[in-house]
Image: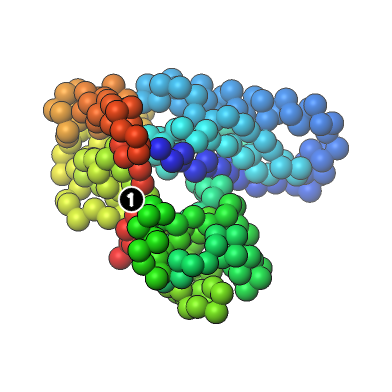
Amino acid sequence: MYPQAEHEVKCHFPAETRTKAAAHTKRSYSARQAISDAALHQVNKALVDNQDVIAPPFLRARVTMRGSISVLTTGNTQNNIIYEDYATIIADALSYYGKCKKVEIGKRFSQFLLHGVPTHLSLPNISNSIATNYPQLTQGQTPRWLAPADRCEQKSTSTIVMTLTSSVKMADIGRHYLTICNRECQLNDYISYGRSTQCRNYQGYGHPAALCRNPSDCAICAEAHETKDHPCTIPTCKKGPACTHPPICCTNCQTPYKASDPNCPERIKIQSFNNNANTNATTNPGDTPMAEVAE
């Protein structure tokens, strides 16, 4: 089973005055660390108190030298948490620090597919070619073949997975082809998914929302609308995915759980199936990533 990429959640706090920013830079390391420790505690507590998250999702928090950005780093096992849905809760948890202007959900790594790479080339040579021809692309690890080695040996060209550091998009790279070892290779987004991947659009399993062609179902009430549009009659409720008020119904099992709830019987059933598959198979096929190109 391949680990999920860690995420970085950046919370932006506008510096009200230059004096305030300058004062923060003069704080000692221990004082800045205490601020980071408090941010980590407050955000983790707020998410766990929301009842949808069963364990603290963030491993680390840090504040920039000028104190204008708080960066929270997730663990790579928290693949069932949709951080975009909790942006408001994160901002509210840090309100003691100041008014959060924006919560930005990013990744520590971004992955792409390169098609048409000659299979006789070694992976280190491919990595060196990328680094030489495109020094602006910082690789997070040596590329790997998408298909198993025995399948690659039967073909003259195949596809590699290229991993770049930080959150990078196709638009940032600015091209659809990369020249690798004097070959022109097509570049596409890499979308990883497995049997336990839950779709944020219709809440079913087996593919991500980017590849979904089904109508939307709400993760809160199972009605035919997007989760972000979920209504609530409680005046104090933030509505949308943060709502915890009845009626709550899972579209997969029709029980009073959110579709994203870790206690959902359907989720437990699928995870149990994957665990058994990984235990009984020598090749670990249970949740090995598949990949498709987003249209």
Which quarter of the rendering shows the C terminus? bottom left
Could you tell me how many numbered marks the image carries?
A: 1
Question: Which element carries disc 1, helix, strand or loop?
Answer: strand
Q: Quadrant of residue 55?
A: top left
Question: Which of the 4 image quadrants contains residue 236?
Answer: top left
- In the image, residue 52 above or below residue 148: above
Q: Residue at x 65, y 24 (%)?
A: 38
Where is residue 18 shown, x and y percent of the image?
79, 48
61 relative to 168, above or below: above
Residue 51 appears left or right of 267? right
Q: Quadrant of the N terminus?
A: top left
Q: Quadrant of residue 68?
A: top right
Residue at horizontal 30 percent and vertical 37 percent from the top: 286
Q: In front here: 228 or 208?
A: 208
Above or below — where is 93 with respect to 144?
above
Residue 132 position, x and y percent, is: 66, 70
The residue tagged 1 is 290
Residue 144, percent across and down? 49, 55
State the residue at coordinates (50%, 24%).
Answer: 56
Type of amino acid at the residue the image marks with label 1? Met
* Dot 1 crowding, Cα within 10 Å, few <14, some 14–19, many 20+: some
Q: Nearer the viewer, residue 122 or 192?
A: 122
Residue 159's x, y, as percent?
41, 63
Q: Residue placed at 17% from the left, 51% from the top?
A: 215
